[in-house]
Image (tube, helix red, strand yellow):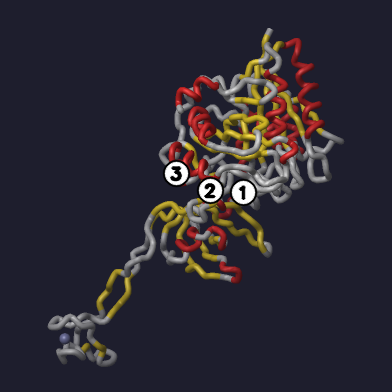
Amino acid sequence: MHIKMHIGIDDTDSISGGCTTYIGALIIEELLKNRETKFIDYPNLIRLNPNIPWKTRGNGAVALRIEVLYDESTKIEEKVVKKVLENAYLDKNTEPTVAFLKGEVPTILKNFAYESIRRRMDIDQAVKIAEKSNVKLFTLNNKKRGIVGAISAIGLTLDDGDYTYELLAYRKKENYGKKREIDEKSVYEMDKLTSPYTFNNIDYEKNRILITPRGPDPVLFGIRGENPEILLTALKRIRVYEPIERWVIYKTNQGTDMHYMDVKRIKELKCYDAVKLLGKVCSPPKIIRGGHLLLTITDEYSDTIECAIYEPTKRLKKTAMYLQCGDTIKVYGVVKEHNNTLMINVEKLYVKKLEKITKKLNPKCPICGATMKSEGKNKGFKCEKCKYKANINTKKEERIILRNIYEGIYLPPPRSQRHLTKPLIRYTNERRSNLQQKMIKNWYWSETLHTNINQNESNEEE
Ligand SMILES: [Zn+2]
């Protein structure tokens, strides 16, 4: 008898290196070796709330969903745990956790997962949810921090609403820490060919390649896109001068804005929440030390909150400088505490409605068109150019001031966007139906497994 099994893995990496997605790839290979094991979905890469203070990297967890022979399930669990322990970077900052669930994902776990993308979750609560959902947990030295991520990865099934894909290619161990040997020109060509169905490949403002991470981790490059097929097309265009050890296509919540919860009242905000909030600007933007920008918004209930837009957001900050009191905006960002008061660090800005700003100006001369000069309070106006004198009842005229800003959505440049942030290029490409697509055959490749991308196929397309 076959049963469904969900595997969640979190907190295997640290600042010094390692990567949960890479351990995921190693486990995938292990599972694919077993002919009785079938993947029922692409491996899932789940980005959690990026604002948790102890998380210094991307805060990603991995879920694998398979069908296995019931009799083999225990053996598989043992194999997975062994693989994690062999490969996790164990230092005082990592607390690797593996979670297993047999059967369908229960609603309470789905709900917990959804919430953990958006807020800071309590570890004890996670343990309770795991118990109630019959999730089996493996932790190291009873350290529990990874539980939230491991069970959330299982719970976030990505079967309705929006999601994207990322193809991650990994380096050989001997090249870790060395410069990534990738032909940058080929990345530009790939982008030209596959955009907008791939995204955030390049930051054109700085001419910087974004598909390669920095630092010692095993990822050689990652291409983000709307479907697996386009990622294979993109992969074929990338020229690298170092061997690829393996690659895998993950289904992911990256680039979906999933983490922002709609909050109506400022009073409801809690520290570390990722939120979107509609409000009116009630104190004009001011620049503080470091070039950062502060402004205050108010909700319908007259509560106010200060919003910070940091200098590295560049064009986002530049735009916000032109906001004025009365403008209706939606801020997307994270709630932080500063000097005992909550504020929002803005990551995205929707300028919904600009207030019509008027200014009272001296009237123009009806004869020559020059701006007239006041003769003093209640003494009327006189044109200095042609000496025309206006009637004493002439008043200042209200004129609409031209704004240096348009209504619309504003984001920081791609290089400063977070994994979960939906880039502009994805607007209108979002998935709305929950139609399950059939999995493509080539979603994993490794030298050792020889499930190569079909060489003939790639030749035909050249
Ligand atoms: Zn005049």
Q: Is residue 389 left or right of residue 80?
A: left
Could you tell me if the residues under marks 2 and 3 are in contact, i.e. CB atoms within 8 Å?
no
For marks 1 and 2, give the one nearer the viewer.
1
Q: Where is residue 135 in the image (x, y as percent from the top left)?
A: 73, 25
Give the answer, above or below, for where 18 lies relative to 158: below
Residue 263 circle label: 2
User: Which is nearer the eye, 128 or 273?
Assistant: 273
Q: For disc 2, does the CB lie below 8 Å from ligand 1?
A: no
Could you tell me if the residues under marks 1 and 2 are in contact, i.e. CB atoms within 8 Å?
yes
Q: What residue type is labelled 2?
A: Val
Q: What residue type is labelled 3?
A: Ile
Of the image marks 1 and 3, the number of the one nearer the N terminus:
1
Place residue 312 in its image quadrant.
Answer: bottom right
Residue density around tag 2, few if under 14, some if 14–19, many if 20 or more, within 10 Å? some
Q: Name the residue under label 3.
A: 425
Residue at 60% in and 59% down: 343
**Is residue 351 visible in this depiction of the protein?**
yes
> Regarding mark 1 in the picture, which secondary structure is present there?
loop
For marks 1 and 3, give the one nearer the viewer.
3
Residue at 56% in and 19% down: 441
Residue 273 circle label: 1
| Ligand 1 visible in quadrant | bottom left
- Whole-Å distance between the Cαs marked 1 and 3? 25 Å
User: Which is nearer the eye, 352 or 396?
Assistant: 352
- Residue found farthest to the top: 1
Of the image marks 2 and 3, the number of the one nearer the N terminus:
2
Residue density around tag 1, few if under 14, some if 14–19, many if 20 or more, within 10 Å? many
Q: What residue type is labelled 1?
A: Asp
